[in-house]
Amino acid sequence: MKKTNEQTQKLDHYGNCPVCGKSWDGGEIFDTMRSYDAYDNLSDFELYEMIRKCYSPPYKWSRLLAMEDPEKYDGVWEYHCPDCGAVFPSEVKKLKS
Ligand SMILES: [Zn+2]
């Protein structure tokens, strides 16, 4: 079976929805953490180091909703746009479909 462009294209979790065009960029993780009192004891450098250890580049939040389907796979099965509800298959779903 020939794969369509949608099936082979990797989803940019921080880019724009290909259906409605709204941005999925949820902002810098650092900015969110810095605003929490719980991290007041950390310097900016220490906070950056903690984020670097616990998260992956580009160290941002994604607004894209990761959905599971426990009957099909133990993990993300598909993604939903929070703005228009468009559904995008995960890499796993593409492989198993
Ligand atoms: Zn959308």
Image (tube, helix red, strand yellow):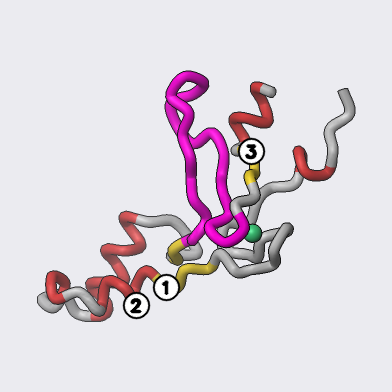
Q: Position of residue 23 (x, y in %)?
A: 60, 69
Nearest the viewer among 21 and 96 is: 21
Give the labeled residue for mark 2.
31
| Residue 84, image quadrant | bottom right
Residue at image position (57%, 39%) is 78
Characterize the local packing of mark 3: few (<14), some (14-19) or many (20 or more) Cα atoms within 10 angstroms. Answer: many
**Amino acid beneath label 3:** Pro
Q: Secondary structure at mark 1?
A: strand
Q: Tag 1 or tag 3, which sits nearer the N-term? A: 1
Nearest the viewer among 30 and 65 is: 65
Residue span colored magenta: 62-84
Q: Tag 2 or tag 3, which sits nearer the N-term? A: 2
Give the labeled residue for mark 3.
89
Q: Is mark 2 within 8 Å of ligand 1?
A: no
Residue at image position (84%, 38%) is 4
Chief secondary structure of the magenta span?
strand
